[in-house]
């Protein structure tokens, strides 16, 4: 939370806007100085106040051509944020099982799963010679965790 507030404070006001605000302050001070010079009848003060006011007006004239530049660290921070958000979305989709649903929806099924499904269909077809033994052998070959669990169950039964 504090980091977010720091980033907002550091990037909240553009440099061009700050230049415009400071130039307005300079013009206000120059006008106050000119007014004071006129009151004390000091022509030098009035002349320099008018010069300062004119220079500040020139800055306002040039400001439309000035563009804000995004600091390199902020650009890098933005891309890191996008990358972290992408990883977070991928993680949530993976953990929720949505990636599996997406893969099934577009028809992208792993080759080993297709071979296993074909063997299961052949095992249930009475016209085919495949048996449950071949299906269990394929499951054990495909998944080392299943193989270890199968051996543990089989060992417990003997």
Image (cartoon, rainbow, N blue to C red):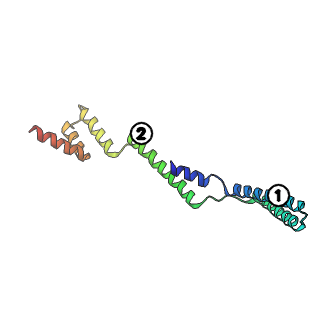
Q: Residue furthest left?
A: 158
Q: Which mark is residue 62?
A: none
Q: Where does the image place residue 116, in percent across and percent down from the top left?
A: 28, 41
Q: Which residue is mark 2?
A: 98
Q: Is residue 10 left or right of residue 154?
A: right
Identify the element where label 2 is drawn. helix
Q: Which residue is mark 1?
A: 32
Q: Nearer the viewer, residue 141 or 124?
A: 141
Q: Residues at badges 2 and 1 in contact (C-beta under 8 Å)? A: no
Q: Residue furthest bottom?
A: 44
Q: Nearer the viewer, residue 10 or 145?
A: 10
Of tags 2 and 1, the one toward the viewer is 1
Q: Where does the image place residue 122, in percent across and percent down from the top left?
A: 26, 36
Residue at left 15%, top 42%? 152
Q: Where does the image place residue 96, in percent across and percent down from the top left?
A: 39, 39
The image quarter containing residue 59 is bottom right
| Image quadrant containing the C terminus | top left
């Amino acid at each position: 939370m504090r980091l977010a507030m720091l980033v907002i404070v550091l990037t909240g006001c553009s440099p061009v806007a700050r230049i415009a605000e400071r130039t307005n302050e300079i013009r206000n001070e120059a006008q106050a100085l000119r007014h004071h010079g006129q009151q004390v009848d000091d022509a030098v003060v009035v002349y320099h106040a008018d010069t300062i006011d004119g220079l500040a007006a020139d800055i306002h004239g040039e400001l439309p051509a000035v563009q804000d530049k995004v600091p390199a660290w902020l650009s890098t921070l933005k891309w890191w944020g996008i990358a972290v958000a992408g990883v977070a979305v991928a993680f949530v989709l993976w953990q929720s099982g949505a990636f599996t649903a997406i893969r099934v929806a577009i028809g992208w099924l792993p080759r080993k799963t297709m071979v296993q499904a074909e063997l299961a269909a052949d095992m249930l077809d009475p016209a085919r010679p495949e048996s449950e033994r071949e299906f269990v052998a394929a499951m054990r070959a495909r998944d080392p965790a299943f193989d270890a669990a199968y051996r543990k169950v089989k060992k417990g039964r003997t």
